[in-house]
C-alpha cells in the first residue's frame, strides 16, 4: 500500500470529491492519524483549509490527471 493509500485509509470519513482532486493534500501524524488538507486554500481564502468530509460539492475541484481515483472500503 502506498503512503497516500495508507493515509487515505486512516481518514475518519470518506473524502468524497477530494479523493480524485489534484488539490488534495494528505498528512499523516507520527501517531498514525491522518488528515486531509485542501491545497487550494493557500491561494483562495474562500476554500476551507481542512474541508469537512465527505466533500460532496466543491467549486475548486479539479480532477487529478496523474492519479486515478482510488477506492476506499469505507
Ligand atoms: S478543491 Fe475542493 S475537492 Fe479539491 S481538495 Fe480542495 S476541498 Fe477537496
Image (tube, grey):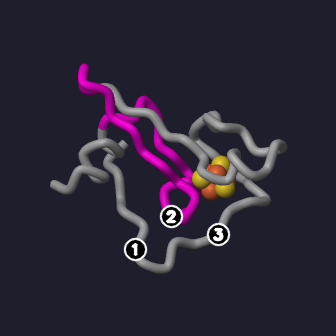
**Magenta stretch: includes residue 28:** yes
What residue is shown at x 42% (from left), y 67% (from top)?
69
Left or right of 59? Residue 62 is: left
Asked whether mark 3 and ligand 1 are closer than 8 Å, the reply comes as yes
| Whole-number angstrom distance, CA of label 2 to CA of label 3 | 8 Å
The answer to which of marks 1 and 3 sits earlier in the sequence is 3
- Disc 3 crowd, CA 10 A, few/some/many (<14, 14-19, 20+): some
Front in this rendered view, residue 67 or 69: 67
Q: Is residue 65 above or below residue 53?
A: below
In percent of width and height, residue 33 lies at 32, 26
Marks 1 & 2, CB-CB < 8 Å contact: yes
Q: Secondary structure at mark 3?
A: loop
Q: Earlier in the sequence, mark 2 or mark 3?
A: 2
Q: Which residue is mark 1?
A: 68
Image point 56% across, 63% down: which residue? 21
Measuring from the top left, give residue 17's x and y in whole percent: 59, 56
What residue is at 31 percent from the left and 42 percent from the top? 7
**Residue receiving disc 3:** 62
User: Of discs 1 and 3, which sits in the foreground?
Assistant: 3
Mark 1 falls on what kind of element?
A: loop
Query: 70 or 26: nearer the eye?
Result: 26
How far apart are the two marked residues, 1 and 2, measured between alpha carbons?
7 Å
Whole-percent x, y for residue 12 in the image: 42, 29
- List x then y, in percent, for residue 62: 64, 69
The residue to which callout 2 is attached is 20
Q: Which SS class for mark 2?
A: helix
* Residue 11 is covered by the magenta coloring: yes
Q: Residues within 10 Å of mark 1 (few under 14, many from 20)?
A: few
Mark 1–mark 3 Cα distance, whole angstroms, equals 13 Å
Q: Which residues are magenta?
A: 10-32
Q: Residues within 10 Å of mark 2 (few under 14, many from 20)?
A: many
Amino acid at each position: 500500500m502506498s503512503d497516500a493509500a495508507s493515509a487515505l485509509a486512516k481518514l475518519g470519513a470518506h473524502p468524497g470529491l477530494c479523493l480524485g482532486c489534484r488539490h488534495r493534500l494528505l498528512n499523516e501524524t507520527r501517531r498514525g492519524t491522518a488528515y486531509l488538507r485542501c491545497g487550494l486554500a493557500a491561494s483562495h481564502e474562500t476554500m476551507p483549509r481542512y474541508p469537512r468530509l465527505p466533500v460532496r460539492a466543491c467549486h475548486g475541484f479539479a480532477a487529478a490527471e496523474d492519479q486515478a481515483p482510488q477506492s476506499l472500503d469505507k
